Amino acid sequence: KVDVGSLLALTGLEVVRFAGSASGRAIIKPDERNIPRLSAFLDIPGFRFNDTHLGHARIRGSFETDAQTIRLQANMTEGTIGQTNVTGYVSLGHKDLDLRVEGENTPLGFLNHYISDIFHNIRGRSSGSCRIFGGFKQIDFEGRQRANAAARLPINGVTYHLNNADVQITPGSFRLNDAILTDSIRGSGRIHGVINHRHLHDMHYDFAMSGHNILLYDR
C-alpha cells in the first residue's frame, strides 16, 4: 500500500491535501509521441480531503512526464449516504490545477482548511457542482451548491445552523442567496450575504439576518 498524503507532499502542493492508503496497479508505456506515460488505477478505502473523510475512493489517473501533469477521474462513495466525482488535472510543471467536482451530500469539513479565519468547525453536507482552478498560489472557485451546514462564528462564539442554503460561487466570492437560520437554543430566521476573497486571502464578509430570538453572543 502507498500513503497518498506522503506521496503528494513530495510535490510541494499545499492548496489541497489528500490522504489515505492506496492499493492498485500502475502501467508505464510510451504514448503516440513516444513519451513515457504512467497510468494508475487506485483503490483507497479511507480517502481524506483536507482532513475530511470522503469515503471509498476509486481513482483512475495518469502522469504526463513531459508536462509533469497528473490527470485524474475519481469517484468517492460513502455507502448510501453520498458520493463525489472529481475530474481534471494538477500540473506540477505549470504549478496550476483545474478540478471539477460534482457531489451529492458531500461532507463540508474540507472547507475548514480555507476559511477557518472566519468560521470555526464547519460541518454539514452539500450537493451541486464546483470548479477549483488556478495557480497553486492563486486558487479560485466557481459553481453552485445547496447545503445544510453548521459553523461557529468566532467573533461572537455562537454556533449557527443553515438549512437549505443556496450558495452561488464565483471567482472571488461565495454568495449565500438565502438560507434558514437557527442557533443552538431556540432562535430562528433567515440569512443572506457574501464572503469576498482574493485567492482565499484578504477575506471579508457581509451578512444580514432577520428572525426571532436569534442568539447574538455566547461567551
Image (cartoon, grey):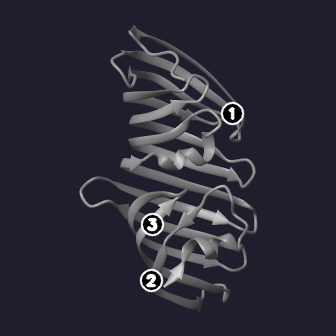
Name the element at disc 3.
Answer: strand
Q: Amino acid at mark 3?
A: Phe
C-alpha distance separating marks 3 and 2: 12 Å
Q: Quadrant of residue 211?
A: top left
Question: What x and y, as percent, mark residue 205?
Answer: 63, 24
Residue 23 tag number: 2
* Residue at position x 61%, y 24% in the image: 155
Q: Residue at x 50, y 81 (%)?
A: 40
Would you name the residue on which mark 3 appears? 47
The residue identified by callout 1 is 197
N-terminal of the two: label 1 or label 3? 3
Marks 3 and 2, the one that precedes in the sequence:
2
Q: Camera-side residue: 107 or 178?
A: 107
Helix, strand or loop for disc 1? strand
Q: Is residue 125 above or below residue 135?
A: above
Residue 97 place in picture, x, y as percent? 65, 58
| Label number found at residue 188 | none
Q: Nearer the viewer, residue 159 or 134?
A: 159
Is residue 127 or residue 150 the one in the foreground?
150
How far apart are the two marked residues, 1 and 3, measured between alpha carbons?
28 Å
Mark 2 crowdedness (10 Å alpha carbons): few <14, some 14-19, many ≥20 = some
Q: Is residue 104 above or below residue 156?
A: below
In x, y percent, where is residue 2? 53, 82
